[in-house]
Amino acid sequence: MTEQSAPERQAPYAPVTDVVSAVARGVCRDTLHRFHYRDGAAVRSLSLADLDAGAVRVAARLDALGVRARDRVGVMAPNRIEWVLLDLAALKLGAVTAAIEPGRHRPAAMAAELGLRLLFTSDPYEGSGAGAVRDIGQVRAWAFDATGPSALPPHPGYDPADLCAIKQTSGSTGPPKSMEVTVASVNQSMAAVQDMFHHGDGDNLLVFLPLYFLQQRFWIYSALVHGHDVTLADRATAADTAPVVSPTVIMGVPGFYEQVRARLEAEGLPGDRAGRGEAIQRALGGRVRYLWTGSAPAGRQMLHFFNDAGVPLYEGYGLTETCIVSKNHPGAFRLGSVGRVLPHKWVRFDKDGVLIVGSSHPLNTRYTSAPPGADERTFLPTGEVRTYDLGHVDEDGFLYIDGRVDDIVSLSTALNILVPAVEERVRELPGVRDCAIFGDGRPYLAAVLSPAAGDLDAEALARDVSKLNRELRHDQRVYGAVVASEPFSVRNGLLNAQYKLVRARIGARYAADLEGVYADHPVCNDGTLADDTPVLVRTAATEPRGGQPEHDEHGKDPQK
């Protein structure tokens, strides 16, 4: 394949508001719009003006503790109001927020590795009232203590090339890597989103993905600058929070919407389009104008479920290293694509079909902390990012992601298969929630299946897979399957924080079960197997891990 670029169909740049400086140096006096947040079982609320004032008081405390402009303040905690207050406080001092996934690292080690002035953690075994590593619980008291200090030093201002955040990769392709983020990259991404979706008065954006993903904090900044409500929940409480706060926009991932769909289908849906749309709206609070999804591929059936019912679900594409690259949106939507490329981004494909992304204002051109060789593998001398995703752009400029380089399975019969397309079809089978396909160096493809609920009937599943095989190309056919002992989840380590398959970990956990399938079902897919070739399905002998198998009882990764 020769190197090619996307068609030149990009719109002019949207006017760029300096959102970062507006949050950092401005005083929010908005008493009309509100910040809603989960506090245990309750949903609490305060005005954006009160949220901003609380952040100023937290900033004054940080200043008293010695935090200065360009210092790094770490936050290592699940979603909570203290997270938001610390992030805003750091901006008000001209500092840098370093976001660290909780439960995966030792706080003291991360404080040293990233050069943090302070690190706030929810880990009861690490946080204290003094020293570099502190208990995040004290932050709320600082914010709402009206008698505490509130005077701040003069803000030095952020240059577009200054850093405002450090974020981590999800770790789905190896150890998490840390990356510094420039102010200009944040401002430009937010300007592009605002140009597409026009968030403003009357909107309420529901955020529940972890705040250690920088993009989730964009919507807090957006509320303060563009004037709208925003609600903070987490994965466990998102579905219950939506009917309470009636969001107009939900920032989700495919796994969340799949769960909504499964629940509604189990309850029974009206047969007409309008009735289905009303049922979806009731489940999500009744005011949804659109749903946002990304971070992992969205299945076509799920996209049709929402869009065909008149509840727009817009898929997009981006990476930690690039932020948002493309997005479907009102007026430019093509189901199955990840939208058109944003005006300040560009894409091209190398000779192997690998997607390369460039930006007028890159997040950065290197990692802050990463294994040796990671920079060279990811960042080109041009400043562009090699994504390792495979895709194409259609004649109208819509980008499609076909899979990843490491999603290609090479059978021992010299057949090479891009497996995400097969996995999507298998996920549509009754009783199957998720699927990971394996077969490198093997004579045929075999799947590890995550059950939707309860036990899967092995015989019925074998019949369903056999029927599906007759609809697939010969090279895509699946002749063996293992029913996992528990659903894939973030808690058991088989999905990452963005609900993507952790394929290597699934393969390692069910390696013995897969080995047994290949040993007991010695067929060879050389492209000539008959349509009625049987499928062997086994229930895994592997015991469920139950809980957090990748961490010890204190929530720490024993390998760190």
Image (spheres, rainbow, N blue to C red):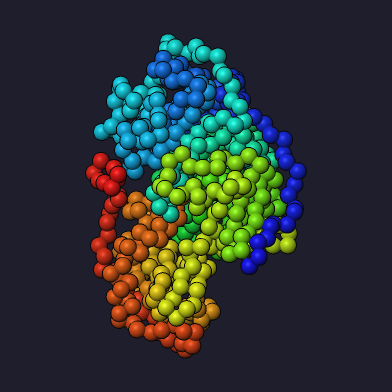
Percent across and percent down for residue 28 are 59, 21
- In this view, the residue in front, 104 or 288, is 104
Is 310 above or below relative to 480?
above
- In this view, the residue in front, 439 or 427, is 439
Is 350 above or below relative to 372?
below
The structure residue drawn at horizontal position 51% and vertical position 55%, both measured from the top left corner, is: 296
Give left or right: position of 524 versus 558.
right
Is 78 above or below relative to 54?
below
The structure residue drawn at horizontal position 38% and vertical position 60%, both measured from the top left corner, is: 504
- In this view, the residue in front, 394 or 466, is 394
Give left or right: position of 10 versus 365.
right
The structure residue drawn at horizontal position 28% and vertical position 47%, both measured from the top left corner, is: 559
Percent across and percent down for residue 558 are 26, 46
Q: Is residue 339 visible?
A: no
Corner quadrant of residue 538: bottom left
The structure residue drawn at horizontal position 51% and vertical position 46%, both measured from the top left corner, is: 320
> Which quarter of the rendering shows the N terminus?
bottom right
Percent across and percent down for residue 76 are 38, 35
> Which quarter of the rendering shows the C terminus?
top left
- In this view, the residue in front, 50 or 123, is 123
Q: Is residue 20 visible?
A: yes
Is 281 above or below relative to 31?
below
Q: Total label count?
A: 0
Percent across and percent down for residue 433 are 43, 63
